[in-house]
Image (cartoon, rainbow, N blue to C red):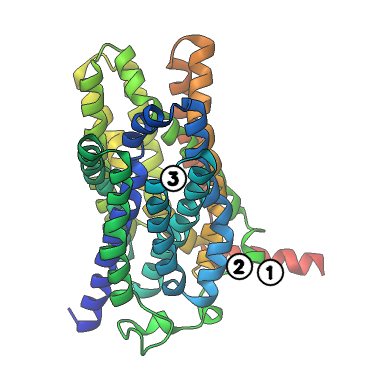
Amino acid sequence: MPEQDWRSWIVVGALFVTLFLIWGPVNASGVFFLPVIKHFGWSRTLLSSMVATAPLAAGVSGPGAGWLIDRIGARKVMIPGAALVALGYFGLSRANSPPAFLVCFVIIGVGITASTIIPTALVIAKNFTARKGLALGMAFSGIPLGGTAITILANHVVVGYGFRAGYLAMATPIVFIAVPLLLLYLPGRSADENPARQTATISSSTLPGLEVSEAIRTRSFWMIAAAELLFALAGVGLRVHLVPFLVGAGYSQTSAAELFGVMFLFSALGAFLAGVPGDRFGGRRTLVAVYVAAAAGIATLFGATHLAMMAIFLLLFGLVRETPVVLLQMVIAESMGIRRLGAILGLQGIFTTIGFAAGPVLAGRIYDSTGSYSAALGVFIAMAIISAIAISACLPLKEQRHRLRLAEAAAA
């Protein structure tokens, strides 16, 4: 493998570590919930509302972050973004009031958008032509793996030293590991900053793809948006309510939590492997298969009282739960190109954020109305199937361009 290729894989490693250290604390947020409530005497509703501002801020800032990344490069956005996340967790370790917590969660949300999914996808898209899917899978597997490892670390620190030390422990590795790695290895827009790949220095205007104004007029943009919204609703709604569902099915709290942890491990494996079929068969075909497998996996929960059905659930749904975050980048690149990939990812992130926020609420309301999660499972299965249909309706970039020209000619 040429030296340039080795340098590109080192960049992937740096991105993996960054996602591991930044998304790990996000997935470990439940560890802090009860200790913070006990210390301040706040209601669960109050703390939940403050925590929810982080994904809300992430979604709102997504289009701006994507636009900025397209124009000044990922390096100049990602490094300050990681520093913001660390600053937010350091602030939480010192905060003593709801307004202070609120501000810290907003800072964390903005920093996450600027330093993780959007810039990671853009860096890999511009540095890889072959094996792009493998590179995406390797980098994004840091999200579920970080969730598993950092949750264990956070729980150990919080139990032993309190939630303030726990928040400080979340910030420290970002400052001393993630930020230095990004400074050392993340490609800049100048060849003098990192000569690993010449494609990293190409002007965005010369890259293949559509402008944002063109992309939002395509069928593919809205089909992808529909899939992102619906699968985020189903995936996050199921994830948040899985443990109480399993307890209601007869499992102990400990067994339900252990099964939940196993699902995270399967998700890490699935995210790592997702890019391999994506490279071979294309992102669109692979993602359609992923959504169908997710629907089948959710359906097995109707037999959750049997361990064999739970094993099938973990295999089917667990393996594919995190793969859309990898494959959607490929689908967008196939259908709309990479010229304005950052801005398009930012716009698509709005739909994902809506799904993240609404999914748990939807499942909770269905349970409160019916006394069962059965109807919610049926809704989630339908959402996964509709997502598969939406992605299958996406068109390749060449066909999208042709349709746009026909529409412009007809208008003229």
- Residue sitting farthest toward the bottom: 192
Find residue 401 and name its label: 2
Q: Residue at x 57, y 49 (%)?
A: 350
Instruction: Tell me, yes or no, whether the two marked residues, 1 and 2, touch with CB atoms within 8 Å.
Output: yes
Image depth: mark 1 or mark 3 in front: 3
Tell me: residue 30, above or below residue 12. Answer: above
20 and 107: which one is in front?
107
Q: Earlier in the sequence, mark 1 or mark 3?
A: 3
Image coordinates for residue 69, horizontal then vertical, percent: 50, 70
Which quarter of the figure has residue 13? bottom left
The amino acid type of the residue labelled 3 equals Ala
- Residue sitting farthest toward the right: 412
Dot 2, how many residues are within 10 Å of its Cα: few (below 14), some (14-19), or many (20+)? some
Task: Name the element at disc 2.
Answer: helix
The amino acid type of the residue labelled 2 equals Arg
Look at the image and tell me whether residue 332 can be seen.
yes
Look at the image and tell me whether residue 230 can be seen.
no
Looking at the figure, which quarter contains the C terminus? bottom right
Image depth: mark 3 or mark 2 in front: 3
Dot 3, how many residues are within 10 Å of its Cα: few (below 14), some (14-19), or many (20+)? some
Find residue 95 and name its label: 3
Determine the CA span between mark 3 and mark 2. 52 Å
Which quarter of the figure has residue 289? top left
Q: Earlier in the sequence, mark 3 or mark 2?
A: 3
Image coordinates for residue 80, horizontal then vertical, percent: 43, 67
The amino acid type of the residue labelled 1 equals Arg
Determine the CA span between mark 1 and mark 3. 55 Å
